[in-house]
Image: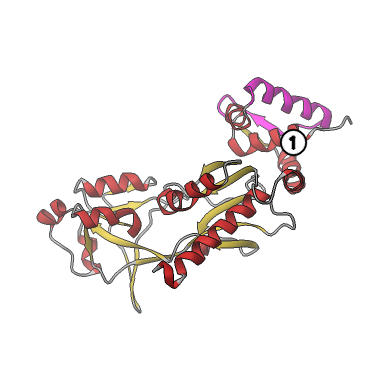
Amino acid sequence: MNRTGLTELEIVLAVARRGTFKAAASELEMSPSAVTNAVAALEKRLGVRLFNRTTRSVALTDAGRRFSEKIVPALAMIRSAAEEAGSDPGDPAGMLRLNVPPESSALWYASILLPFLQRYPRIRVDIYSQKERVDIVADGFDAGIRLAEDVPGDMIAVRLTPEMRMIVVAAPAYLAHAGTPQTPEALDQHQTLCMRMADGSVYRWELSQQQQRYRLQGEPRMAASDMSAIHQAALAGLGIACMTEQQVAADVQAGRLVHLLPGWQVPLGALCLYYPGHRLVPPALRALTDFVRAQRDASASPEAG
């Protein structure tokens, strides 16, 4: 078999990650035809089909999945070694591929990512938003961002945010005609706006207050996987929502939303950056983790308060 180039392997992983040749070409800054031809040429040399193709998308075959799983760690090590050799420790460079939850940017984007990129102008970032939890190694990401409880046990986790919680809110206009619930049980008699999970189920708020627990029972008036849609529906007075406190803080302060049942909440824990504990950590990723830790230490210092 002829030698296979690293570029071809990177193309295979990009197609697997993005699901179409066009999306992979955009990520790699190549033409779709170049990506298609590279995959076809590699399949011919290997003598095996790596992808099943349809008019809408491409997906790994069983052989393609096994092939990808084998090459991911090897490519990660090669990229890391190359970046390590060519990067000045004081001015790191390289690409960071991050897998993050949708609509989480308000929690870390402005406070962490933007100042990080301003400090390190030679580092590039490719952010992929995905509700489903993924294997970041198998899918070719350098790191992921998830709630602490969702971080796999074999990963190194760096806390990005303080402990977070979800709170119950509604617009004054809704409360004016529907009344204000005084207990969690009263929520079941109200119009509620709930989140649809990645598996298709509707999240029933699991509220707690000290040792007390209550799980929402009633059917929601609206369920959506897009939290911004729930946010807008709450502001429009369509019902009661349970949302991250940071997401609605400005609305509560301005009186556009009212914080209901203030003793009750859904504890979320902290949002964490996580990555595999390989021996060689890419310089760009090391710079990011050091930056996050430095910010966290600074905010925890007495002078910061």
Task: Say which residue label 1 marks.
Answer: 9
Quadrant into which the N terminus falls = top right
Residue that protrudes farthest toward the right in the picture:
1
Q: Amino acid at mark 1?
A: Leu
**Which range is magenta?**
30-57
Describe residue 115's horizontal placement relative to residue 193 as left or right: right
Establish if 79 lies above or below 287: above
**Residue 260 location in percent, x, y?**
22, 64
- The answer to whether residue 88 is left or right of residue 148 is right
| Residue 243 locus on image (x, y percent) | 33, 56
Query: Is residue 159 at least partly visible in the picture?
Result: no
Q: How many marks?
A: 1
The residue drawn where x is 59% and y is 26% is 22
Category of crowding for the residue at label 1, using alpha-carbon neighbours closer than 10 angstroms: few (below 14), some (14–19), many (at least 20): some
**Near-viewer residue (202 or 129):** 129
Relative placement, left or right, of 259 versus 198 is: left
Residue 287: image x %, image y %? 61, 53
